[in-house]
Amino acid sequence: MPGALVVERLAKRYPGPPEITALAGVDLEVRPGEIFGLLGPNGAGKTTTVGVCTTRVRATSGRVLVEGLDVRAEPAAVKRRIGVVTQQNTLDRACTLRENLYFHCRFFGFSATEARARADELLQRLRLTDRAGALPLTLSGGLAQRVQIARAVAHRPHILFLDEPTAGLDPQSRLALWELVAELRRDGLTVLLTTHYMEEADRLSDRVAIIDHGRVLVTGTPAELKRTVGAGTVVQVRLTRTDPALLAALRGLPGVGEVEEAPGGLRVLAQGREGLISSLVETAIPYGLQDVAITEPTLETVFIKLTGRDLRE
């Protein structure tokens, strides 16, 4: 089955001095009906990739196909097939919620009757019928983002682009948005989601690509990527000081695969937990042991293994 979205050798450079390379040869393929997560730190190239895919940014080289249409050669046809939610709130502040949805549908060729029906359908689906006459500035951040998603899908696109959709939202609003995105996918929509939240990408995405410095480092399902770490347990060890002798001693403990320096201490990758923690604590106490935290591998663990730095940097 051909990809709903195909990105080939995508590059974007901004002239200087100094010249800035935002994308350095990105290759991606998003399958129809899947949620695809583009994960990386701020400045990695996620937003630029979405900008090119949605016709808002012109690439220096490479190409993007949306359902076989070249975004550079046929931008109008591409826009009819995509919905876009950017990081900023772009709802028309002078229009009510119903009007935001209504005029969006009219812009995409709906008749007045069709546009009113579609706007009312979406307001009912979001349980916002009683707020239909409200202005966007009266909404919380979470509700405003839900309305932006409703507007983005109002013209019934095939692919939805969500660029950092939960940035700045509280945990409750974030969970509500996750449920909405999963619901849209069940309706058959293809979703490309950019985020720097590992849990978000892990929970929502069928497949994930990790991007950094304008390059895709790895692509696969969250489970596949986490298996590449080669560890079933990750132990974060906080210490007042570290020493090469401590690293060597920890690497010699049964089941330990790798020991890496981390902010405030060390990160230990191990196959299992049985007998590990007591031995680790005993070994680390002379070095000012402050805390031990045990987790399973995450997508951030994969990123650290690939780049040697935290995803949040």
Image: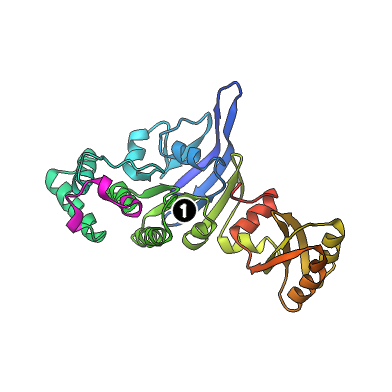
Residue type, label 1: Arg
Residue 26: percent from left, percent from top: 57, 40
Q: Is residue 10 left or right of residue 143?
A: right
User: Does residue 307 appear anywhere in the picture?
Assistant: yes
User: Does residue 121 appear anywhere in the picture?
Assistant: no
Residue 155: percent from left, percent from top: 26, 47
- In the rendered structure, does residue 154 fall within the stretch colored magenta? no
Residue 72: percent from left, percent from top: 43, 32
Q: Is residue 136 left or right of residue 61?
A: left
**Mark 1, secondary structure of its residue:** loop
Q: Is 99 situated above or below 186?
A: above
Task: Write down the region rendered in magenta.
Answer: 129-144
- In the rendered structure, does residue 135 fall within the stretch colored magenta? yes
The front one of 73 and 176 is 176
What residue is shown with label 1? 31
The front one of 180 and 54 is 180
Q: Is 262 situated above or below 76?
A: below
Mark 1 Cα within 10 Å, few/some/many (few <14, many 20+)? some
Q: Is residue 79 left or right of residue 202?
A: left
Residue appearing at x 19%, y 57% in the figure: 129
The front one of 91 and 50 is 91
Residue appearing at x 29%, y 42% in the figure: 91
